[in-house]
Image: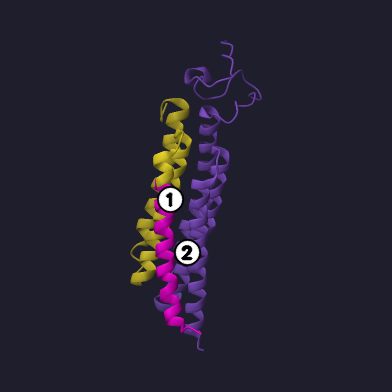
Chain colours: A yellow, B purple
Amino acid sequence: MIAPDRLYDLALVFAFAALSLAQILAMIRLVIGPDVADRILALDTMVVDAIGLIVLLGIAQGTEIYFEAALIFAMLGFVSTVAYARFILRGDIIE
Amino acid sequence: MNVTDLVEIIIAVALVIGALFTLVGSIGLLKLDTAMKRLHAPTKAATLGIGSLLVASMLHSFAFGSGSLKEILIMVFLFVTAPISANFIAKVAIHRGQDMPPPEPPKDQNWATLNPTDETVPGIEAPAKT
């Protein structure tokens, strides 16, 4: 039986590794994506993974000052996804 | 086993669940073969994965800090915006896609997007100009 402290540290390291791997996989899809839709989707996924990494950093350092950064990432990620998709669909963002 | 140990175990479980869901979402994004199948993997897995990570963060702040519920803001924002961005990406995939031509628009002559023939999508007639 592992001690809870050790289990917690292991889970944190595992989460960092898994999210970094997820970020790299999304980056591969961003490079090889056959169409623009796949690239937009890969960018959206990368933003979500970045939010997860920021939250993990906040847990690891025991602070809450990264909360605003994660919230701003979420908002900017949504706006940029919609703007990119709208530019592809309409040829313009604000008509 | 005291309360702190129990909270640490719960945080560890939430972290592992969130990290696994996020990883599975990216693996699905890379592995599935058409654009529509690729669309479904990250949008669902990312919301549940990030939600679980945020639950872990909230538990951590309650157990070892002053406690905050602000992470619910991020969770709600992601849950609200994920279907909208998925809808936009699906529209892009339909209108540029090689999978299938877009279905007939329900009311008007054409979709409220660029003229499909401008993008040289195969199998689509030019819509009638009115």
Residue B112 picture quarter: top right
At x 45%, y 32%, the residue is: A86
The residues colored magenta run A1-27
Residue at the spot 47% in from the left edge and 64% down from the top edge:
B53
For numbered disc 1, what is the local secondary structure? helix
Q: Position of residue B77 (x, y in %)?
A: 49, 52
**Chain where mark 2 sits:** B
Tell whether B71 sits left or right of B45. Answer: left
Choose between A39 and B1: the one closer to the eye.
A39
Q: Which residue is under mark 2?
A: B53
Tag 1 residue: A25
Q: Mark 1, chain letter?
A: A
Which amino acid type corresponds to the residue marked 2 in the rendered image?
A: Leu
* Residue B11 covered by magenta stretch: no
In magenta segment, residue A14:
yes
> What's under tag 1, amino acid-wise?
Leu
Q: Residues within 10 Å of mark 2 (few under 14, many from 20)?
A: many
Give the Cα distance between marks 2 and 1: 19 Å
Marks 2 and 1: same chain? Answer: no
Residue found at x 45% / y 75%: B62
From the viewer's perspective, tell me whether residue A50 is left or right of residue B96: left
Residue B35: x and y in percent read 54, 38
**Position in image of residue A32 (x %, y %):** 42, 39
Q: Is residue B2 above or below residue B68?
A: below
Q: What secondary structure is marked by label 2?
A: helix
Answer above or below: position of B41 versus B62. above
Q: Main secondary structure of the magenta part?
A: helix
Mark 2 vs mark 1: give the one in front: 1
Q: Are marks 2 and 1 in contact (CB under 8 Å)?
A: no
